[in-house]
């Protein structure tokens, strides 16, 4: 799996800024946000090179009607895919283009919520994106079993795909599954990064004092 440092460094810097607000802006009671990084290697995933592929994102509820208590925000895209204009169904909006601040937002308020963009796959292509899953009320109708899907299809569409799945449980936690060629990584919350930064600062201060002594 390829690693693209500039994009990752920009994201870490953004998370550090968010961490400065985490202490003063606590989440609403019952609300949780879990952040994931999804990476796809088209070669390992067995996707064919060429035009006619599709990048598809869905957030579908476990029961209908749903109380629209889950949101998936997809952002910080890094890829060498050529993506077309978005087509949406249900509670879905936005688009993704590499090298921009674009984002896609999907809610689980309708039976089928989908956003897709055509994708041409060059040889050895990759995709790296972040997904924030926010659950405003884990006890609300339609929370347990609501699932976010990110699918990358090649030109065969019907049978060749790489799929990452994030499923929301009754307690608001998120489980993950993926096909070959995909890596899903859980990213620390801003408050966790803030505590890490504080710990590193303390270690640095102790080290300076020892050198002075």
Image (spheres, rainbow, N blue to C red):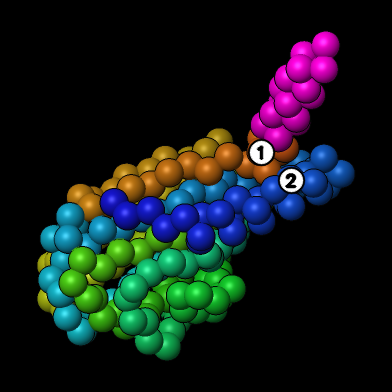
Q: Residue at x 32, y 75 (%)?
A: 81
Question: Is 156 located above or below residue 170 in the figure?
Answer: below
- Quote the CA–CA distance across marks 1 and 2: 7 Å
First in sequence: mark 1 vs mark 2: 2
Q: Residues within 10 Å of mark 1 (few under 14, many from 20)?
A: many
Left of 213 or right of it: where is 102?
A: left
Q: Residue at x 82, y 17 (%)?
A: 212
Q: Residues within 10 Å of mark 2 (few under 14, many from 20)?
A: many
Where residue 57 appears, as percent x and y from the top left, is 40, 68
Quarter of image, res 163: bottom left
Q: Nearer the viewer, residue 17 or 180?
A: 17
Quarter of image, res 70: bottom right
View extreme (top): residue: 213
Where residue 116 appears, as percent x and y from the top left, is 38, 77
Q: Residue at x 42, y 88 (%)?
A: 85
Left of 66 or right of it: where is 32?
A: right
Which region of the structure is painted magenta?
195-213
View extreme (bottom): residue: 85
Where residue 118 appears, as percent x and y from the top left, is 32, 83
Q: Nearer the viewer, residue 200 or 192?
A: 200
Q: Are marks 1 and 2 in contact (CB under 8 Å)?
A: yes
Q: Quadrant of the C terminus?
A: top right
Q: Which residue is mark 2?
A: 19
């Amino acid at each position: 799996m390829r690693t693209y440092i500039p994009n990752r460094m920009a994201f870490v810097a953004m998370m550090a800024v968010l961490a400065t607000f985490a202490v003063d802006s606590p989440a609403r009671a019952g609300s949780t946000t879990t952040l994931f990084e999804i990476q796809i290697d088209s070669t390992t995933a067995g996707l064919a090179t060429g035009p006619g592929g599709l990048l598809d994102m869905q957030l579908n509820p476990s029961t209908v009607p749903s109380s629209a208590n889950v949101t998936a925000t997809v952002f910080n895209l890094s890829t060498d895919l050529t993506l077309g204009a978005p087509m949406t169904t249900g509670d879905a909006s936005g688009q993704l283009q590499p090298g921009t601040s674009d984002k896609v937002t999907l809610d689980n308020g309708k039976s089928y919520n989908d956003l897709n963009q055509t994708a041409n796959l060059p040889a050895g292509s990759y995709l790296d994106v972040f997904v924030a899953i926010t659950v405003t009320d884990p006890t609300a109708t339609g929370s347990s079993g609501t699932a976010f899907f990110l699918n990358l299809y090649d030109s065969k569409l019907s049978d060749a795909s790489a799929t990452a799945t994030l499923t929301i449980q009754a307690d608001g936690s998120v489980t993950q599954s993926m096909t070959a060629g995909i890596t899903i990584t859980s990213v620390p919350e801003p408050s966790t990064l803030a505590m890490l930064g504080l710990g590193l600062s303390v270690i640095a201060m102790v080290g300076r004092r020892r050198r002075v002594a």
